[in-house]
Amino acid sequence: MFLLLFIILHQINQYQHQQQLQQINEEQYKLEMLYQKAYHLIQTEEPSSLLPLYSFPDGTITISPIPDTMAGQAYQLELTSDTGGFRQMNFYLQE
C-alpha cells in the first residue's frame, strides 16, 4: 500500500515539473521569436525610421540606439513577452 501511494505521489510531482518545464519552454520560445522580429526590423529598416517601441500579439520590443560605438551601429533591445518574460541585450550591426 505504501509503495502504491509513493508511486502515485511521485507521478503527480513529475507531472507538475513537466508542466513548469513546458511553461518555461514556451516563454523562451516567445522571447526568441521577439528577438528574431527585432533582428529583422534592424536589418531591414533604415536607422532613422526605427521606432522606439513595437507591439506584437506575443509581446513588445523596445529598440534604443547606443551612441558613440566604433563597431558600427549598436542598439539596446528590451524584449517583453505577453506573459511577463523579459530579456535585455545589446545588438551590434556591422557596417
Image (cartoon, rainbow, N blue to C red):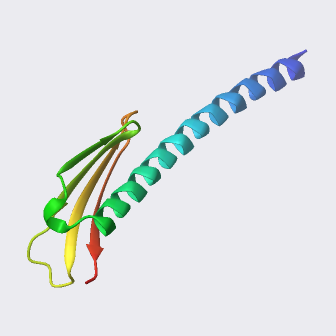
The image quarter containing residue 65 is bottom left
Q: Is residue 18 above or below residue 62?
A: above
Where is residue 86 shown, x and y percent of the image? 34, 45
Residue projecting furthest to the left:
68
* Residue appearing at x 16%, y 60% in the figure: 49
Where is residue 6 shown, x and y percent of the image? 81, 23
Q: In which quadrant will I find the N terminus?
A: top right
Q: Nearer the viewer, residue 7 or 89?
A: 89
Judge from the rendering whether residue 29 lies leftward or rightward of residue 1; answer left or right: left
Q: Nearer the viewer, residue 13 or 73?
A: 73
* Residue appearing at x 83%, y 18% in the figure: 5
* Residue appearing at x 66%, y 35% in the figure: 18
Judge from the rendering whether residue 78 lies leftward or rightward of residue 15; answer left or right: left
The image quarter containing residue 35 is bottom left
Where is residue 53 shown, x and y percent of the image? 21, 47
Q: In which quadrant will I find the C terminus?
A: bottom left
